[in-house]
């Protein structure tokens, strides 16, 4: 099954880089890509794959380091950003399935790590988020059946 | 006095807050946009070798990743007192024009067109990207996204990494391109020109052939009379990567100033307003006249419409043709109708695509002389670039080892701050009457800032996504009467 792991985040804003740090563990094992934000570039990268794992930071009010899994189609089913400058990951995925149903991955899994600090300019994640990284890596490896 | 606010959902996401005050009759008394300063990058850069700055500032924003990279790269040239080799300059221009195509396409289709295609007062559930695709047809949507991907491919091919570019070196570019790559870019350029034609056609069919929308574009509700700033080439035409001069014109279109590099300090002053996190720049020679538009104002705008107003047209044929059509429609310049920003954005899209074709047609672009010898540290550099959202200025001072000591970044949204405030106030005053406010009216107000494509240093993001602005409405006694956001979760 042709698989890609996509990390989204900013490497310079502490916990915002968590998705990127997780993806580093999959380089050489499966196809990987790092993006700074969830716009049309996500489609550019996942079209043609059977399976895509998208890893990102999440701010949902839970304990920092909490790992959450989001169904790309049924979570935030009706979120619309009509404002400025950017669109959401969920809109992008909906557009993908609307326009390119045959090229979109049959499976998309979105894994989020609850962030604590995404405002401090730093390349290091905060301790609780850092502790979550190996757990997410194991979770994805198990899902992909990678040892 | 009633108070209407558009608040940030979180401090992370865009940091925009619009406050609208209503009087006792429920009409708009005043309106303000408040934003948060850049997220500490200017301080973060202090102590950093200037060579590391371009790839660092490219993370300021995932959308604008190429623009901060390019402005700082040009400033870095200044710090070392070098000019890029001719080939390096062509590669930088190629890279930058690809970025223009990518950015303008995303802004138009995701944020600009839905208001017109789906209807300005349509609910958010319909007035969005998917709604737009359903209206214009999946085939058009597919074509747009596939062709746009070509611009991203050029960006990544030249820039080196998908996440953000890394190819900047002082006086050069990290690697040359092969003849095979040049030919591939040339093929992509044709696709991008087709994308430009298609986009102008969509604008024509959806907006220009619809009297209701033409009336909206021409309406005083969306008219902001200010001065304009934009970069021009040696023929006075619109250019992006390396303008020869920055030109200011007044509200009548008369040239009032022309500057290069560090001279920006002689022409732009900033006013700190007590209620705002952000300074409001103004034309220095006019002095601060307040947040007011009209003849004599000291506020100014940047961006596609400003460039249209400042420059003598475009250097490529299809863009020039579209420029003349727009000029004929309005009859004269400057055009102060801010919804026309979207039109000029579409014209610049095809211009950038044509520029790519011209650059890639030049076989000498594969020359391998892409690096300049570095022999000295001058210690100061200014990079000015005309980016999708307008004039971007990066200014650095370094020590004799080229370590950054001071950094000053003026971004397009900052330049536009005063004009955006006026735009929001005018639209709010026009549409909010007698205290009646609903989602449709709020969107009509939001349409006043959308043409400027605000970027509030959206450097970080977390799921569920960027949520830049929330709107709250207060009664004249300070009571919150309505809270609205520019997105919807159902």
Image (spheres, coloured by chain):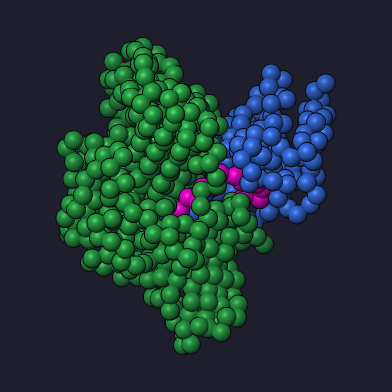
Front-most of B96 and A101?
A: B96
- Give the residue drawn at x 36%, y 67%: B291
Residue furthest to the front in view is B400
Q: Is residue B302 visible?
A: yes
Q: Which colour is chain B painted?
A: green
Left or right of B203 in this view: B62: right
Looking at the rendered structure, the number of numbered marks drawn on it comes to 0
The secondary structure that most of the magenta stretch takes on is loop
- Give the residue drawn at x 80%, y 31%: A134
Front-most of B163 and B357?
A: B163
The image shows residue A120, relative to residue A135, as above or below, that is below
Residue B464 painted magenta: yes
Magenta residues, start to end: B454-465
Left or right of B401 in this view: B368: left
Q: Is residue B207 visible?
A: no
- Give the residue drawn at x 30%, y 34%: B242
Left or right of B50 in this view: A52: right
Q: Which colour is chain A painted?
A: blue
Front-most of B211 and B90?
A: B90
> Percent position (x, y) of residue B121?
48, 68
Could you tell me which quadrant the C terminus of chain B lies in? bottom right
Residue B210 painted magenta: no
> Percent position (x, y) of residue B376?
36, 19
Residue furthest to the bottom in view is B25
- Give the residue drawn at x 80%, y 49%: A63
């Amino acid at each position: 099954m042709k698989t890609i792991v996509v990390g989204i985040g900013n490497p310079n804003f502490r916990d915002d880089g968590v998705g990127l740090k997780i993806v580093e563990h999959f380089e050489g094992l499966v196809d990987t890509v790092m993006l700074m934000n969830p716009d049309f570039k996500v489609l550019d990268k996942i079209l043609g794959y059977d399976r895509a794992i998208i890893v990102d930071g999440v701010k949902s009010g839970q304990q920092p380091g909490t790992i959450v899994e989001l169904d790309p189609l049924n979570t935030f089913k009706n979120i619309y950003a009509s404002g400025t400058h950017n669109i959401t990951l969920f809109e992008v995925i909906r557009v993908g399935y609307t326009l390119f149903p045959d090229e979109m991955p049959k499976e998309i899994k979105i894994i989020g790590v609850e962030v604590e600090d995404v405002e401090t300019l730093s390349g290091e994640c905060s301790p609780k988020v850092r502790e979550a990284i190996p757990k997410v890596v194991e979770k994805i490896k198990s899902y992909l059946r990678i040892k | 006095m009633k108070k209407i606010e558009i608040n940030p959902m979180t401090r992370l996401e865009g940091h925009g807050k619009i406050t609208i005050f209503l009087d006792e009759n429920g009409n708009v008394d005043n309106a303000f946009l408040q934003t948060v300063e850049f997220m500490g990058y200017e301080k973060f850069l202090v102590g950093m070798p200037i060579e590391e700055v371009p790839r660092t500032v490219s993370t300021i924003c995932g959308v604008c990743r190429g623009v901060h990279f390019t402005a700082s790269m040009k400033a870095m040239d200044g710090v070392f007192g070098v000019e890029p080799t001719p080939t390096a300059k062509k590669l930088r221009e190629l890279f930058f024009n690809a970025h223009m195509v990518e950015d303008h396409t995303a802004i138009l289709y995701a944020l600009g067109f839905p208001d017109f295609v789906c209807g300005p007062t349509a609910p958010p559930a319909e007035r969005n990207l998917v709604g737009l695709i359903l209206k214009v047809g999946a085939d058009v949507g597919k074509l747009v996204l596939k062709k746009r991907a070509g611009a991203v491919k050029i960006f990544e091919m030249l820039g080196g990494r998908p996440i953000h570019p890394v190819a900047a070196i002082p006086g050069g570019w990290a690697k040359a391109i092969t003849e095979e790559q040049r030919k591939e870019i040339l093929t992509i350029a044709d696709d991008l020109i087709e994308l430009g034609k298609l986009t102008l056609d969509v604008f024509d069919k959806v907006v220009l052939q619809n009297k209701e929308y033409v009336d909206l574009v021409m309406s005083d509700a969306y008219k902001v009379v200010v001065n304009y700033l934009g970069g021009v080439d040696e023929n006075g035409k619109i250019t992006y990567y390396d303008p020869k001069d920055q030109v200011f014109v007044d509200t009548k279109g008369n040239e009032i100033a022309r500057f290069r590099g560090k001279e920006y300090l002689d022409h732009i002053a900033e006013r700190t307003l007590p209620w705002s996190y952000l300074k409001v720049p103004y034309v220095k020679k006019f002095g601060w006249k307040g947040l007011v538009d009209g003849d004599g104002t000291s506020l100014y705008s940047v961006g596609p419409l400003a460039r249209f107003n400042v420059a003598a047209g475009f250097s490529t044929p299809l863009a020039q043709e579209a420029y003349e059509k727009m000029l004929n429609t309005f009859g004269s310049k400057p055009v102060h109708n801010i919804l026309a920003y979207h039109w000029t954005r579409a014209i610049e899209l095809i211009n950038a695509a044509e520029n790519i074709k011209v650059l890639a047609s030049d076989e000498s672009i594969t020359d391998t002389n892409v690096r300049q010898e570095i022999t000295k540290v001058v210690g100061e550099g200014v990079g000015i670039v005309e980016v999708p959202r307008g004039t971007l200025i990066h200014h650095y001072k370094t020590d004799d080892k080229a370590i950054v000591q001071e950094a000053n970044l003026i971004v397009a949204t900052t330049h536009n701050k005063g004009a955006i405030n006026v735009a929001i106030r005018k639209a709010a005053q026009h549409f909010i009457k007698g205290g009646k406010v609903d989602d449709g009216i709020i969107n009509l107000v939001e349409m006043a800032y959308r043409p400027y494509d605000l970027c509030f240093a959206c450097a970080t993001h977390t799921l569920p996504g960027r949520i830049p602005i929330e709107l709250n409405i207060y009664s004249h006694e300070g009571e919150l009467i309505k809270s609205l956001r520019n997105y919807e979760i159902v």
